[in-house]
Structures are given as structure tokens and as C-alpha cells.
Image: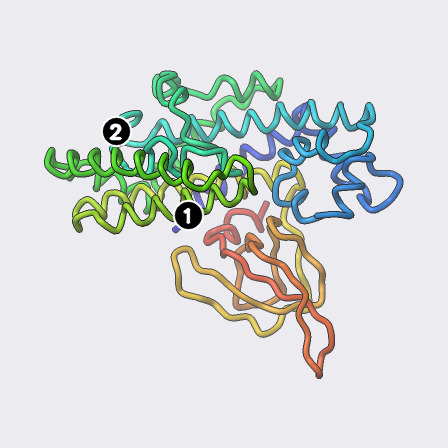
Amino acid sequence: MSTTEIWRAVGFLADCWSKSQKVTPVREELSLDLDSEEATPCLRALALRDPQSITKMPFHVHKAFPHMGIGISQRDRALAANSAAVELAFFHLTWWIRSRLPGYPHIPAPQLAKGSFHTLNNFTVPWAPQVLQAGIEYQDRPVNCDFQLKISADDRYSVLAEAFEELPSWRAFTQAHHALGQEIRNELLTARQQLARQAAAAGAESGIEFGDPREGLNRARSVTMQTLETLSPEARRFAESFESVNEEIDRITTAVLTQLVAYGPPETLTGVSELTVSPSSPPTVSFKLLDAGYAGGIYWTDDPLIGDAILLECFRFAGDNVFATRFHADGTVLLGTGAAWRAI
């Protein structure tokens, strides 16, 4: 469950990062009509094939350029170089925020086993063993972020870290950490060893290195979740509290902050209808609309029921015999963004 304070801190940092000499050229390229000749050749080709991948991972898509079977222009090379620097800054920020967690770098969560879903390059920032051994927990600020972006974010990092520590998910993990006894810790570490063996066996049996990489990620997630189901109630509460806070960190740093830095404040989707809210944590919504949107984007809606911004998780075509073709969207409500961002 997010807070107004975390979104104010995120907006504070996004405003600084968006002015970086590494970010502004990327924003300029992304703001063009990517279906037209004014876009770079690689971005135009990717927009024709999978436009939502650009919106979801604006600083990551440059990695697809060498594999597209077309010539890479000088503009594409410049875009890739700047995007790589920004992407690395997001990695270092996420790693630094994680290093503030209680118990880091010796968190006994089974999910951190070698070969588990969280340790793989799964389109989020991996829990890499070399990072856990890098001593990031001793840094009072993520210095590599400013180095990559050629900026000075000053106290914005400490403001963000303090806001993270006040999140309900962070507080819950802190409580779980302090309540951890040696017996439960041993159970968690044993489960981690078991998960590492299962992950290695699953990969060897499937031959996934020759197939779709998503198959390997799905298999790793499945094996990880199966291991958590074998834990005692106390151990499972710790593992689930870690999962919750880790998911929230990833959502804030690699999804929301990325969108604000790449595209600026949320736009408004109009013509929203049939909106339903699921009381999950955080809440999710499903609705139909007349406007087009993109998965991964952050939007306001014109429905008075939702005053906060929505992170669009899925966007697709829908229709019926009365209204003909319309769009359908599913998203996550970013609780507190209305109070944090609308007044800015």
C-alpha cells in the first residue's frame, strides 16, 4: 500500500532526473511520432511490431536494436548509448533502495536462491550475488546514479529512502525481520538451498537455453512459489513480507519512476466506462474507454471514482454489438498520487 509521501519523493527525483543530459535526448526521441519517418529507424520498426514494449521499457528497448535485422543509424546508436546510461542509473537506484532493507545483505528469504526468479534477468532489476557483496549498504547515497546521469540529485535520494521506510510493506518486513528466531531462519535458509537445487534441475531438464527465455522465467517463478508453499506459517509470513516489499520497490523504481522520467506527468484517459475495482493490495481496476493507451503507461482517468493515477498493466481491444470497437484496460491504482501530483 503506497503513501502520498512516497509519490512526492518520486516526483521530486523524477523532476531532477528528467533534466539530465542523458535523459533529455531520449525523451525527445520518444516524443516523436514513432510510426512516421521522423522517428529513428529502429524505434519506427519496433513501434510497428510491438509499440507497447517501448512504453513499458523505454530505457530498455535499445537492447533489441542489434537483433532487428535492420541497419542501426547514428541516431539509434546515440539513443542506445543514452538509454543504457539511464537504465544503469535505475539499476543502481533500485539496488541502493534494497540495501536499506533490514538484514541486508543477509536476508534469508528463499526467493534469493541462485536460479530463482528474483535472481534472473527478468525485465526487473535482478538480485545479483555480486551486488549483494558490493557493500552498497554502506553508501549514504547511490553515487553511481549521479555519475551515470551527469547530475547531482542532492538530498532527493535520502528523501526517497525515508519515504520507502514509512511504507506499510516496509514496516511489515521490518517487524518480520525483528521477530525472526534462529529456528525459522534455519528453515528459510534450508528452503533456499532446496530452491537452488530445484531451479538448477528445472533448467537442466527443460533445455530452456535453446527456447523462449520467457519459458525459463515462468518456470523459475513457478518453482519459487512452490517452495514457499512448503514453509511453516511463521517462515512463510517472513517470505511473503519480503515478496510484498520487494514488489513495491520494483513497482515504484522500475515502473512508475521510469514512466515519469521518460514521459513526464500522467495524461488523462477520457471516455472511461464500466470501471470495476478489485479490493486487492494495491487495488486494481478494469474498465473500457474510448481513448487509446499503452501498457506500462501512467494515466489519470475521467471517472470520479478513481482520484489517483493508474499504472496500466494491460491494454487491448474490446467491443460489443452496441458500442462496436472499444478499448479495454486493466491497471493498478497508485494510492496517494492524487494528493501528491495533482497540485504540482
Considering depth in this image, is 205 or 218 the residue closer to the camera? 205
Q: Residue at 38%, 51% (x, y): give it.
A: 1
Q: CA distance from mark 1 to mark 2?
A: 24 Å
Q: Amino acid at mark 1?
A: Thr
Residue 3 got which mark?
A: 1
- Residue lying at the far bottom in this picture: please name it: 322
Q: Residue at 30%, 34% (x, y): give it.
A: 197
- Give how far across and how far down residue 272 sits, in percent: 63, 68
Considering depth in this image, is 20 or 119 the residue closer to the camera? 119
Query: In which quadrant is the C terminus drawn?
Result: top right
Disc 1 packing (10 Å; few <14; some 14–19; many ≥20):
some
Quarter of image, res 22: top right
- Residue lying at the far right in this picture: please name it: 37
- Give how far across and how far down residue 76 sits, in percent: 78, 28
Circle 2 sits in a helix, a strand or a loop, which is it? loop
Seen in the picture, residue 17 relative to 36 is either above or below; the reply is above
- Decide if residue 140 is on the left or right side of residue 90: left
User: Which residue in the protein does label 2 denote?
Assistant: 103
The answer to which of marks 1 and 2 sits earlier in the sequence is 1
Total numbered circles? 2
- Give how far across and how far down residue 56 sits, in percent: 61, 44
Disc 2 packing (10 Å; few <14; some 14–19; many ≥20):
few
